[in-house]
Amino acid sequence: MYSRIINGNEHTFGVSGKLIRNALGMYDHQTDTLWSQLLGEAVQGELSGTKLEVLPAMMTTWEEWKTIHPDTLAIQKGFVGNWDAYSGYYTSSDEGVLGVEQSDDRLGAKEFVIGVNLGQDAVAYPFGVLDRELVVNDLINDVPAVVVFDSDTATGVVWKRNLADGRLLTFTADEGENIRDLETGTLWNGFSGQAITGELAGEKLKQIPSTLVFWFAWFDFHPATRLYGHDQE
């Protein structure tokens, strides 16, 4: 998810019909510039080289989202149901529609990962590893981070582990989607980042933008990525 404010001006976007290394290519109506969905960067046109501001978001089930945000309003567009024209694509081993420039066989091409890119440091957290390790305390480009994952809903969120006052926390899994910090024993909701009970009740973690994406696509854009659970630290 990205902000539509560019250089102080609000822009609107549409689908170009083009693929940029297997990722959707979008364009803005104001300048006709072509943008990469995965990079959030203008790749052709008047604003070429400009980066959009990344807004933290999460991919989850509607049920889970409503539990966290009960007052949510949703846009319903067109078809309602479970039919998916791309279902065969998801189950195939093909590395995209156009093929890839960079390839890595440490994971299956279509294994999902949670990708994080902070500065020059890119990290991929495979679902296969997160299924076993639901809470991951990590360091990304010197930023203390925690990845929280739920296998049933395939929901993953990444938070900063340091609070505004500088305190650094280490987390472990608790019941359901909850996590607990070892320093104070405070119970947190792992998907909202809100401290529920304990010494830090009322505090809220700051979300780190992340992307739920196929491994082949993440690696093609970030060939220097660290692969959590596979690379030696």
Image: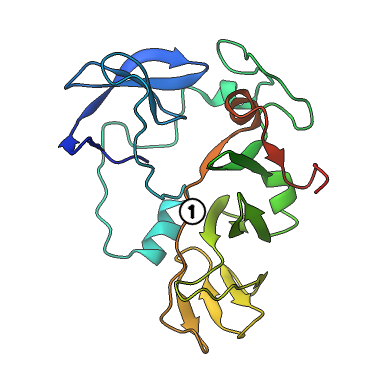
Position in image of residue 18 (x %, y %): 39, 12
Q: Quadrant of the N terminus?
A: top left
Residue 192 falls in image quadrant: bottom left
Evaluate whether residue 151 shows in this view: no
Residue under the point 52% across and 75% down:
188
Position in image of residue 29 (x %, y %): 19, 21
Q: Amino acid at mark 1?
A: Ile
Position in image of residue 10 (x %, y %): 17, 36
Position in image of residue 47 (x %, y %): 28, 21
Mark 1 lies on a secondary structure that is loop
Query: As drawn, is 121 to the left or to the right of 205?
Result: right
Residue holding disc 1:
208
Residue 101, above or below 120: above
Pick whichever, 51 or 181, lies toward us.
Answer: 51
Most extreme residue toward the right, as rendered? 232
Residue under the point 37% across and 32% down:
51
